[in-house]
Image (tube, grey):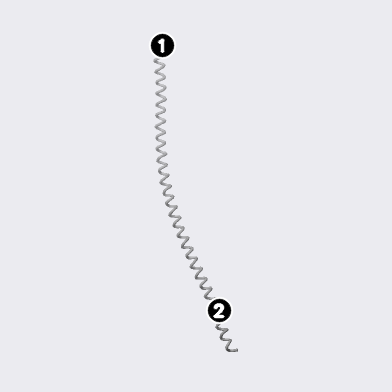
């Protein structure tokens, strides 16, 4: 009978090992599914990051041009204002010089 118990005991150990192996195989399959899911999410995140980078670069370029245009407009306005002020000053000096030169012969 001891051989019957040994066979029964061995069969119990084999069943236990098989249960553990099945459990391990299930865990490996779950892990593989999770890794695949993570890989897909990682790829989607990479695509989103690339789109964000491209959009950021386009926005940076657009804002740079907007800033350049603004600076050009400010420069043109400053030149016009300075030209007007200088023109007024020169006109007043000519007028006063003309008036002074007109008075000198009378004296």
Relative height, residue 21 to residue 62 (above, below): above
Judge from the rendering whether residue 85 lies leftward or rightward of residue 13; answer left or right: right
Q: Which residue is tagged 2?
A: 93
The quadrant the N terminus occupies is top left
Q: Residues within 10 Å of mark 1 (few under 14, many from 20)?
A: few
- Residue pictured at 49% horizontal, 66% vertical: 75
The picture places residue 59, in percent across and down from the top left corner, at 44, 55
- Residue pictured at 51% horizontal, 73% vertical: 84
The picture places residue 14, in percent across and down from the top left corner, at 40, 20
Judge from the rendering whether residue 12 lies leftward or rightward of residue 90; answer left or right: left
The quadrant the C terminus occupies is bottom right
Q: Which residue is tagged 1?
A: 2
The picture places residue 92, in percent across and down from the top left corner, at 55, 78
In-front residue for pair 28/96: 96
Labelled disc at residue 14: none
- SS at mark 1 in the image: helix
Relative height, residue 60 to residue 95 (above, below): above
- Total marks placed: 2
Relative height, residue 87 to residue 52 (above, below): below
The picture places residue 85, in percent across and down from the top left corner, at 53, 73
Q: Distance between the residues labelled 2 and 1?
A: 132 Å
Q: Residues within 10 Å of mark 2 (few under 14, many from 20)?
A: few
- Residue pictured at 41% horizontal, 19% vertical: 13
Relative height, residue 86 to residue 49 (above, below): below
- SS at mark 2 in the image: helix
């Amino acid at each position: 009978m001891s051989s019957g118990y040994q066979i029964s005991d061995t069969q119990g150990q084999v069943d236990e090992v098989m249960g553990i192996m099945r459990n391990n195989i299930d865990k490996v399959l779950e892990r593989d599914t999770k890794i695949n899911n993570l890989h897909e999410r990682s790829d989607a995140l990479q695509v989103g990051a690339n789109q964000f980078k491209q959009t950021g670069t386009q926005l940076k370029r657009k804002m740079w041009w907007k800033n350049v245009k603004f600076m050009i407009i400010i420069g043109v306005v400053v030149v016009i204002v300075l030209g007007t002020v200088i023109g007024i000053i020169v006109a007043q000096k000519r007028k006063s010089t003309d008036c002074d030169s007109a008075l000198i012969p009378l004296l």
